[in-house]
Amino acid sequence: MRQIFLKIILAVISINAYAYEEPMIKAPFSDDPTSFLLIGNSFMYYNNSMHKPLLGIYNSIKNNTLNIKARTFYINGSALSWHDVESYINNPNVGAFKFNSQNQIEPFEDRSYDIAIMQDCSQCPIHPELSSDFHKYVKKHARTLRNQNIEPVLMMTWAYKSQPSMIETISQEYTVAGNENKLLIIPAGLAFSRSIQSHPEIDLYADDKHPSREGTYLAAATIYASIFQTSPIGNTYEFGIEPEVRKKLQSIAWETYLEYYTNNK
């Protein structure tokens, strides 16, 4: 009886989570983006950083002719208001050099970026004392990035494991912020909710908030689907996840992309 009740609750959550304002921006403005900034907190840096499976998924495509790169700016427990985005772009010391195979210092030849993917703290968009700051700093950072010809994108975070209904308000606030600022929203949080409903045997959480390896992979697959508008199903990048589990997560990412964008057209 308890299992049936849980399934009913999850089904209601899934339906309600999609009853939000229609996303206006359904594709990135950037054509064939190859360079990314990831700006966030521990939701992104768990499991050796979300950029690793994102690049891994992309680079596993057969006949791939693009060389993509990513730079990350993570602050533990941070809100968007903590990040000095302008300094990430304009500080000449940030990303100024690298070490080659002979341990010699070399300058980075290209420090430009096509897309910046941002996420706020887990409660910031929905907390009564912080929600206004969420919208304020999405607007501020979006303007800063666009002034440098970098497209701003938001990654919707997920609900806590113990509070799945959080996703209803989270999804609404991210979609509103995206529409207010004409930003693409990556529905990673909705992918978590869909996966929990369809495949509760896959644990997406390392604790009550942070992603497990499977959770990080699912979020990265959703980023890939949303930005490149391409299905990750069948992708061979492993990320230490069993093939059958990986296949399920790939399907969830693609289904979430289709429902969030296509069904709202």
Image (spheres, rainbow, N blue to C red):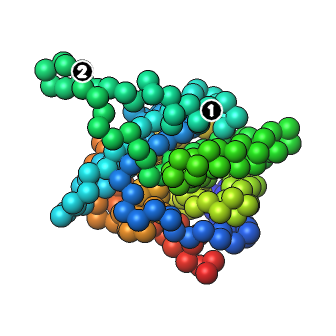
| Image position, residue 116 (x, y; %) | 51, 47
Q: Is residue 26 left or right of residue 8?
A: left
Rendered view: 175 above or below 139? below
Q: Report crowding for label 1: few under 14, some 14 to 19, many 20 or more residues within 10 A (C-alpha).
A: some
Name, please, the residue furthest toward the right.
128
Name the mark on residue 105. Answer: 2
| Image position, residue 91 (x, y; %) | 50, 28
> Could you say which is closer to the camera, residue 159 or residue 145?
145
Rendered view: 205 above or below 260? above
Q: Is residue 146 left or right of residue 19?
A: left
| Image position, residue 224 (x, y; %) | 41, 58
Which residue is denoted by mark 1 in the rendering?
83
Which residue type does callout 2 highlight? Ile
Q: Is residue 262 left or right of residue 251?
A: right
Classify the position of the C terminus by image quarter: bottom right
> Could you say which is closer to the camera, residue 243 or residue 127?
127
Q: Residue at the location (47% across, 56% down)?
A: 223
Q: Residue at the location (67% across, 30% down)?
A: 82
Q: Report crowding for label 2: few under 14, some 14 to 19, many 20 or more residues within 10 A (C-alpha).
A: few
Using the rendered image of the protein, determine whether residue 49 is visible from the camera's viewpoint: yes
The answer for how far apart the CA atoms under marks 1 and 2 are is 28 Å
Instruction: Determine the secondary structure under disc 2.
Output: strand
> Could you say which is closer to the camera, residue 139 or residue 54?
139
* Quarter of the rendering containing residue 106: top left
Rendered view: 29 above or below 95? below
Which residue type does callout 1 highlight? His
Mark 1 vs mark 2, foreground winner is: 2
